[in-house]
Amino acid sequence: MPKEKLDLIVEGGKATTTPQLAQKLGPLRINISEVIKKINEKTESFFGVKVPIKVIIDTDTKEVDISVGTPPVSELIKNELKLEKGSGVPNKDIKGNIAIEQVIKIANMKKDAMYVTDLKSAVKNVIGSCNSLGVYVENEPAKFFIKKIDQGNFDNDIKQVKKEPSQEKLAELKNKLKEVQLVYMKEQEKIKAEEEKAKEAATAAATGVGEGEKKEETKPAEPKKEEKKKEEKKK
């Protein structure tokens, strides 16, 4: 059966008619509004995130199949925390502090695309990505938080697929993040000051001038006594 394929990038749950869709569906007399509705239903769990989709059209039966891809876990984490990028030093420069509910939400989105058998395993995969991005989970390094998952501390939350943390929790996580970032900033300022001091010391050693010291002005040599006497006789 002849089929037409169309690859698109849409914002989850907010797809609209595009020239590409109109050019493909119009000549086939397929209801574009119905296709858009189907796309939005398929992508609603990715609300606010741009996702790749494949539109497959059977030109004989006019049936339309929507295949939804998913962004990388790292992109979903950054989108959830409104981050432009991850950390260059993930074990020190912490960029975000995510709630377990947000982790579960992302894991639920990606579990079908992961090689996992259950949501709990998907949660652990997401936490691993948090560690690589420099994102804390519930106020602590992600690599330590995985132990709590293994111990079953959040089995009930995972079983209920809790996706929305309370505003109080989000505020608490945000305040903790500020504290951690402030400590890192002060450490960096200290390191920078020490580097500047070492640089000044090295420069001083190379020029032979100590800190606060000034080169003595060179005084002209006094004439010798014999030369003085000859000068006096001439006079």
Image (spheres, helix red, strand yellow):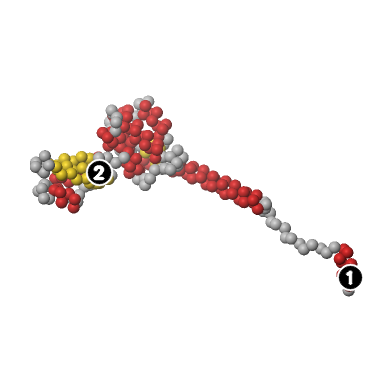
Q: What's the CA distance linking mark 1 and mark 2? A: 104 Å
In the rendered image, which quarter is residue 111 located in? Answer: top left
Q: Which residue is mark 1?
A: 232
| Closest to the observer, 135 or 196 | 196
Which of the numbered marks, if any, corresponds to residue 159? none
Q: Quadrant of the C terminus?
A: bottom right
Q: Please, what is the three-letter code of the amino acid marked with disc 2?
A: Pro
| Residue 11 horizontal/vertical position (percent) | 25, 46
Q: Amino acid at mark 1?
A: Glu
User: Residue 216, image x and y in percent?
Assistant: 72, 58
Mark 1, secondary structure of its residue: helix
Taking the image as shown, residue 31 lies to the left or right of residue 13, namely left
Spot occupied by residue 67 in the image (x, y as percentages of width and height):
20, 40
Looking at this view, is 167 or 47 the one in front?
Answer: 47
Label 2 sits on a secondary structure element that is strand
Judge left or right: residue 108 versus residue 219.
Answer: left
At which x and y percent is residue 20? 19, 50
Q: Which residue is mark 2?
A: 52
